[in-house]
Amino acid sequence: MRYFPQVAVLTAGLWSAVAGKPLPPTQDPWYDQPANIASYAPGQTIRSRQLPNQLSPFLPISVTVSVASVHQFLFRTTDSLGNPVAAVNTLIQPQNADPSKLLAYALYYDSSNPACEPSYTLQPGSDPAGLPGIVFANTTLSSDSAFLAASLNQGWWIVTTDYEGLNADFSAGIISGQATLDGVRGALIEGPKLGLSKDARYAMWGYSGGSIAVNYAAELQPTYAPELNFVGAAAGGNIANLSSALGRVNKGPYAGLAFGSISGLSKAYPNVSEWLDRALLPEKKAEFDALASSCLVGELTQGFLKDIYSFFVKGEASFEEDAPQTVMRLAGQMGIHGTPKMPMYIYKPVNDEISPGADTDELVDTYCQGGATVEYTRDLIGGHGSLWLTGSANAMGWIADRLNGKPVSHPGSCTKQDVLLSALNPDMITYFGEELWTFLKWTLGGILGPL
Ligand SMILES: *[C@@H]1O[C@H](CO)[C@@H](O)[C@H](O)[C@H]1NC(C)=O
Ligand SMILES: *[C@@H]1O[C@H](CO)[C@@H](O)[C@H](O)[C@H]1NC(C)=O
Ligand SMILES: *[C@@H]1O[C@H](CO)[C@@H](O)[C@H](O)[C@H]1NC(C)=O
């Protein structure tokens, strides 16, 4: 049995206990990239700071996540065009930390606004408390930090990287992967000074937007960071083909993501920026910018059912131009940047409302033909939102096995499994801790049914 002693990290606290509000990244000089950035090695620290031992909760309630320490590092990475740039790591030491385990947790933040980067949103006080934290279109609430909290609950050290870079290049795969890898390099340099073992095992995990960090990092690792030796990577709700994802979300409940994505690509690629200036209808620019600069909650609520093509001079045909086509392939097509060497756990709903399940089937085939080790679980009933919860429980168990040093069952080969939503292994509830589980059940009860 792979049970861990439960350590309660969710403790009742008061928002008012937070001394002062943190400054958003664009107003905080700590985030400034130095002029001599090229003189730093990838992963090397430029500057650091220690924050209060508290994280923003994953929902706007009077609960904070208390941890042993929180450190942030501005470090050097490489952008989508190969230029040296800075990015930010948040390194979190849980209560009762196990020094032998480090998880690189790629939060889905899915926004092209730097104020939605986790180094800011994880700080208590960045988001309005109470109801406004849910309903304000500009809320920075990060629902994904639920599983970050659950991971801390295992005693794992966590590094979470602002993998979109300082400008928030949402959906740009190359910078996301490289910043994730340099984030791990950075954590392996700085962690041991704070108590992490220098021989710690390390793995990666990300869902949805987080898969953009994890899949590209796994593909790029053999060439970009060959010295790193991950025990595994779990990635779910994969955005395997950005171009087809854009078509799938359009006019649907997740349509808002398309605006942040196009805006993010335009920050990473000058030719997309030039195209956007030309292709966007002038009278729609203000609305486009507002949608593109929301954090996830605002993006989804304000972008609900919107037609992104209606914002463009030539409608859908604007997206057939060379600049968006070449860049969506280069930065948004998984499987073309290399074959992951680390074992992968991939979980995906067949009926994913954001990125078609078939695209991930194809991705897994590509990885497997290249000789990768992949455990692929497809959910036949659930959707993108429900698998986030049910699939994450099992992903976490897989990561726990890897961090415990248990070898994968089929090294060098691929296994595929189709499951039903109800196949959630109730044993996995143990991983979440009772408080978190109860809370998730309460918030997501409608999706989960009578569990
Ligand atoms: C967010 O929006 C609310 C309501 O429109 C407003 O009161 C608040 O000042 C805004 N906060 C930020 C940080 O812009
Ligand atoms: C990605 O999706 C686009 C749009 O549906 C499609 O034209 C393209 O062939 C897909 N790429 C791959 C590699 O499947
Ligand atoms: C846009 O820029 C990217 C990155 O430099 C490049 O790979 C791509 O070919 C460019 N597209 C066009 C149409 O020039």
Image (cartoon, grey):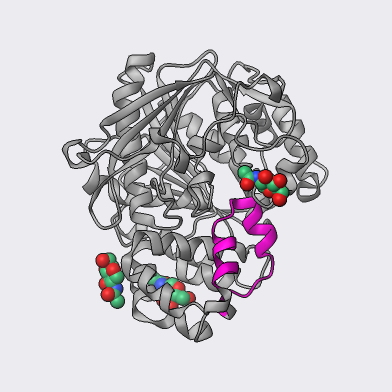
> Is residue 291 shown in magenta?
yes
Instruction: Indicate the position of residue 264 as horizontal and vertical percent values.
Output: 44, 59
Q: Would residue 42 appear left or right of 395 to someone viewing this image? A: left
* Magenta segment: 285-309
User: What residue lies at 38% left-to-right and 50% top-to-bottom?
Assistant: 176
The stretch drawn in magenta includes residue 252: no
Residue 107 placement (x, y as % from top left)? 52, 42
Q: Is residue 422 visible?
A: no
Is 416 rendered above or below residue 232?
A: below
The reply, left or right, for residue 62 in relation to residue 117 is: right
Foreground pick, 363 / 16:
16
Quadrant assignment for the N terminus: top right
Q: Is residue 88 above or below residue 332?
A: above
Give the residue furthest to the left: 39
Left or right: where does residue 136 sit relative to residue 119? right
**Residue found at the very far right of the displayed protein:** 450
Q: Residue at x 69, y 25 (%)?
A: 15
Q: Quadrant of residue 149?
A: top right
Q: What is the count of numbered marks?
A: 0
Image position of 163 with respect to 379: above or below? above
Give the image location of residue 227, x and y in percent.
22, 36
Position of the C terminus by quadrant: top right
Q: Main secondary structure of the magenta part?
A: helix
Looking at this view, is 271 or 145 the one in front?
271
Name the residue at 57% across, 68% down.
Answer: 286
Is residue 212 visible in the rendered image? The answer is: yes
Where residue 99 sits in the image (x, y, percent)?
A: 41, 16
Residue sitting at 71 percent across and 20 percent down? 13
